[in-house]
Image (tube, rainbow, N blue to C red):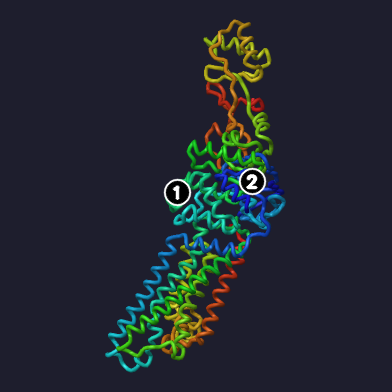
Amino acid sequence: MSAVTAAAVDGGVTTGPAPMPPGRYTFAGALRSEWTKLCSVRSTTWSLVATAVLTVAIGILATGSEASRWAHSDLGDRLAFDPTSLSLAGFLFGQLAIGVLGVLMVSAEYGTGTIRATFGAIPHRTLVLAAKVAVFSGVAFVLGEILAFASFFIGQAILSGSTPTAALSQPGVLRAVVGGGLFLTVLGLFALGLGTIIRHSAGAITAFVGIFFVIPLIVEALPSSIKDAVGKYLPDNIGATMTTVKPGFRTDVPTFSPWISFGLLCAYAAVALIVGGVLLARRDA
Amino acid sequence: MIEARGLTKHYGDTTAVRDLSFDVRPGQVTGFLGPNGSGKSTTMRMIMGLDRPDAGRVTVNGHVYRDLHWPLREVGALLEAKAIHPGRSAFDHLWALAQTNGIPRSRVTAVLDEVGLESVARKRAGKFSLGMGQRLGIAAALLGDPGVLLFDEPVNGLDPEGIRWVRHLLRGLAAEGRTVFVSSHLMSEMALTADQLVVIGRGRLIAEMPVAEFIACNSRQFVRVRTSTVTELTELTDALARAGAQVVDDDGAICVTGPCAAEIGDLAASTGVTLHELSPQMASLEDAFMELTRDSVEFHVHDDDADHPGAAGGDRPVPVSGLAPGER
């Protein structure tokens, strides 16, 4: 490394290849590189900020309108009322944004051609994928939890005085709020897997939207026997189950318990990432 | 040192590279020459381990690329211009690459200086011209100060000054003892830059030899002669033919293969013919290269001259490439 530095000090004029330092490229280096890539593109920052603002804003709108409507709502609505889940209403938008970001972690590299430089620097491709997964998970989890807690506290503040409110100490509330951030993270990882499999941004985002938003609409139109059997496996119902304190009220189909739902989501993400990783290693770049 | 042995690559039904073997040695610039679509980029990607060969193997310094411990410190590559996220700065692009191979930040600044991009290092690369993109790609190749360098069409999009700079850079890198492998579809560029040539067409090896040898084997020398009158020209043509020279009409002049200019001048003087032109000529290397790869060009332009070189007779001017002795 000293020879490289020396060449740089010479004014950049190289005088023959530098001697090779001991060791080899590492996962830590791959992590630092992925972090640099993520932070150095302005659109990433902007989309994260936009995600944050809109997620919280939608939560504010949802809680605000409920607060003003409460006096006129009937008993059934009042029984089903879940102030925790309502305050997390903005996560519907957050899911879409985090999914797009997950897809772009990989597909943007194919779109711009930088994937070849990346694999040229780190020929062990699954190491690259692992670094992307780690960096993305970290960012998505921190952002997701901040948004979940922010949405929760702001939402409860808006509701207080008009409707019953939730507190983190009540049963299931902390689990639902933390679940919001976890759901975003793992859903984003599923999208990252899709991006690795499909490689084209537009195609992968379409697939993600299709799985997340279109399939539920189709299932909704099916006879209730099928709907009840299939519904609990759908990612949108998993998300609803994870972020609600009253599971039976938020969705109109039978669901798994919150943690089993989360396990199922993790399995989806794992399958997408494993298939993506195998294809990544086998295919020409 | 790059060693390719029996490299073969299919894409569906098309064979991009077929049983290709060659060596690229250190200390010289090796030109990788072939028409567009002849498999140069595919070969480069196989060297880099990006595309997997269907048969054969290629090693860099004795190792398959994916086994290299510090790939960027051993091999630097410019594969395509502007392979960079448009929203990322040149500095960040290189810094992200540098971090993977433990290359210090100071080296990023140094290579940006070296390629002349220091003033735009913090600008978003989406605004770069093709030439600036090439310079950034070259900076990325130099980043790890590697002993082996691959450049795929490095002068594309560069202005004449940039082309000279690349030529100088490549020769300098080779002079430092590095292995320099540079592809081009322009023979003239390679004649100025390369020491050694690997010529391919339709994915097959056509020639592997020093540039000087390639020029000697493939360029044809002849002398163009013009006289004051048509009668004198005929007279001289007859005299030359008797002396065993090959003579071809060339639009009011003749092209003579065999004797040198001095001998032709002496012959003209002895037959009393007044010369208006006596100029030694050399068929261009581009012609030689096209001649060599004619049968292997993927997409022909279908005009008569291209398909039937040297077939013209009668009043038509004879193309220079029609002067090959073998074709007469």
> Is the residue marked by circle 1 packed among few (<14), some (14-19), or many (20+) residues within 10 Å?
some
**Quadrant assignment, res A30:** bottom right
Amino acid type, callout 2:
Gly
Q: Residue at x 65, y 14 (%)?
A: B241
Foreground: disc 1 or disc 2? 1
Q: Which residue is drawn at 50% across and 70% down?
A: A191
Q: How far apart are marks 1 and 2 (CA)?
A: 39 Å
Q: Callout 2: residue from which chain?
A: B
Of labels 1 and 2, earlier in sequence is 1
Residue B326 higher or lower than A174, as above or below: above
Residue A22 higher or lower than A278, as above or below: above
Question: Residue A47 has which mark?
Answer: none
Most foreground residue, B169 or B14: B169
Horizontal placement of B70 versus A238: left or right?
A: right
Question: Mark 1 = which residue?
Answer: B120
Amino acid type, callout 1:
Val
Most foreground residue, A11 or B241: A11
Q: Position of residue B132 (x, y in %)?
A: 47, 46
Q: Which residue is drawn at 61% across and 60% down?
A: A283
Question: Mark 2 = which residue?
Answer: B203
Quarter of the C terminus of chain B within the rendering: top right
- Residue A279 in view in this figure: no
**Quadrant assignment, res B273:** top right
